[in-house]
Amino acid sequence: MEWFLKVVRDNFSNFEGRARRKEYWMFILFNLIIQIGFGVAIGIFGAISPFLIYIPGLVMLAYALYVFIPNLAVLVRRLHDTGNSGWMLLVAFIPLIGGIWLLVLLCTEGQYGPNQYGPDPKAEFNDDIDEIGVKINW
């Protein structure tokens, strides 16, 4: 929830700077959980009455419109972290391979140290682990 609020509240339309993987994927995960909740609500309301589907459907539409700009902004900042321009998100429109290529870019670890888009976002948190799957010895 902290990362979702960081994107929506603190960086609503901030297309500058860099976003680390954790910020991007936690935002996406929280959005997915909310969308699943809306889907369940639509199913429950639809079982009661077909006309009640519109209530959660309209709320879901309002939510989707609200998070559209923050979603785009965090996507651009994530691409900046990998050293790519925000325009690279247009690669998703290439049939078949575009979406896969964008997914790989979004999963790629960001550049160490500052790049042309700003300072390293991991540097401010001083993480001990900067790779997924590193074994911790207790």
Image (cartoon, grey):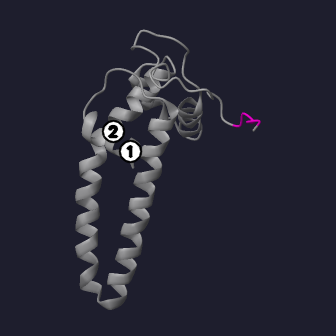
Left or right, 60 with reference to 37 = left
Q: Quadrant of the C terminus?
A: top right
Q: Who is closer to the viewer here, 3 or 66?
A: 3
- Residue marked by disc 1: 2
Q: What residue is rendered at 42% in x and 19% in y?
A: 85
The answer to whether residue 27 is magenta is no
Left or right, 136 with reference to 116 = right
- Establish if 50 lies above or below 97: below
Secondary element under disc 2, as helix, strand or loop, is: helix
As shown in the figure, which amino acid type bears the numbered disc 2?
A: Lys
Specify start and end residues of the magenta stretch as a single range: 133-137
Question: Residue 75 at what x, y percent from top left?
Answer: 41, 34
Image quadrant of residue 89? top left
Q: CA distance from mark 2 to mark 1?
A: 6 Å
Left or right, 136 with reference to 45 = right
Q: What residue is rendered at 27% in x and 56% in y?
A: 63
- Establish if 122 lies above or below 61: above
- Residue marked by disc 2: 6
Q: Are marks 2 and 1 in contact (CB under 8 Å)?
A: yes
Q: Who is closer to the viewer here, 57 or 124?
A: 124
How many tags in the picture? 2
Q: What residue is rendered at 29% in x and 86% in y?
A: 50
As shown in the figure, which amino acid type bears the numbered disc 1?
A: Glu
